[in-house]
Image (spheres, rainbow, N blue to C red):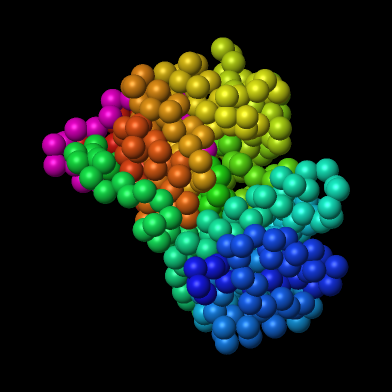
Amino acid sequence: MTAGKIDVLVAEDSTVVRMMLLHLLESDPQFRVIGAVGDGQAALDLVRSNKPDVVLMDIHMPCLNGFEATRRIMETDPVPIVICSATANPKDVVVAFQAMEAGAVACIEKPLAWGKRDFDALAANLLETLKLMSEVKVVRRSVRTRPDSLSASPPVNRPKAPAEPSTVGILRNPAPVPGTSNPSGASSATVARMIGIGASTGGPQALQAILAGLPKDFPVPLLIVQHIAAGFLPGLAEWLNQTAGTQVHIATQGTLPSPGHAYLAPDGLQMGIDAAGKITLTREPDASRLQPAVSHLFRALADRFGTGALGVLLSGMGQDGAKELKTMKDLGAITIAQDQESSVVHGMPGAAIELGGATHVLPVEKIASALINLTARPAEKGS
């Protein structure tokens, strides 16, 4: 950072949009724009010569597109990269998520013009995301033999210590990690019947890593609330289906969830489960004002399945789902929170850990094996 300011590089091929983004950034005294370029190669060159704190990266650009520029930056001079997309076209969104898999830390919707509906909210989200992501400590990606190959378990983007409150010492005697040796020989007698997963910023990468680690015959359905910009969900589902192996669907009213399938809560709807075990979608407001809300899903699973539910809270800003994960645990359900080291943002899982709501605190690369262990029949778990 320069004189306490956040140094930003803007990569955007549209001159009009680039000027709008520059005006927006320069209106906030916390930012200093160190460069504004119109193509991916220029972004790569500027990062090498004058490393910014964060890059705001468009998808469609000449010379190198947003994915390829991100991939090369993360292999040579890694910095936090926020993908900014103006379109919810599923094919474009898939490219955005590929860029996240290549190392970008977040994907946000681009505010296009003053006066347009939701412009103020989108602009505020852009500024807030850039501030938070500038604090993320990223790691260098290894050079791939195939530039367009997709990794099931991407390296971790680790937040700097000041970004989130430390969780060291919160769990002094944590429960044994599922799927690892347990000296006492104890194991959970409860077999999970339904899994709920909540995620926000950093969630798509975590979801991809988890779903890619599950076998095709995984015996339990997964219900997922992922906070994401409106219209981006179909692209997320398509990307996960392409890379994770698990069949991913956007949930529909009255669907009976199938084992081994994952169901994403639709934009603007709360996802729950009824007495018959079918998915319910409603527009009822949540105390968090989020639709969909992780808190709503976790409450529904706690009410419907009790000890047979399993809750997982992944990387994300805020506290959505933290109290409800604690409720699930208090009712006897197994709960998992992503650890700080593997979270892009540890807000949601960190809040759950502080409340004592996590049975297990795990790095993202161990969550899939934990889910496999916790959904196996007792006879399948061995001694």
Q: Is residue 270 something one can see in this rendering?
A: yes
Q: Which residues are magenta?
A: 179-198
For the view shown, which residue lies furthest in the left direction? 184
Front-most of residues 177 and 73:
73
Q: Residue at x 56, y 75 (%)?
A: 52
366 vs 1: above or below: above
Q: Is 54 colored magenta in this rendering?
A: no
Q: Residue at x 45, y 70 (%)?
A: 139
Front-most of residues 365 and 41:
41
154 vs 375: above or below: below
Q: Quadrant of the C terminus?
A: top left
230 vs 154: above or below: above
How many numbered discs sit on the rendered protein? 0
Residue 32: horizontal and vertical position, in percent? Answer: 61, 70
Residue 286: horizontal and vertical position, in percent? Answer: 60, 24
Q: Is residue 228 left or right of residue 116?
A: left
Residue 26: horizontal and vertical position, in percent? Answer: 69, 65
Q: Residue at x 26, y 41 (%)?
A: 170
For the view shown, which residue lies furthest in the top direction? 275
Q: Residue at x 46, y 74 (%)?
A: 140
Front-most of residues 246 and 293:
293
Residue 306: horizontal and vertical position, in percent? Answer: 42, 18
Q: Is 185 colored magenta in this rendering?
A: yes
Q: Is residue 191 something one can see in this rendering?
A: no
Q: Is residue 147 left or right of residue 172?
A: right
Among the 4 quarters of the image, the one containing residue 175 = top left
Magenta span: chief secondary structure:
loop
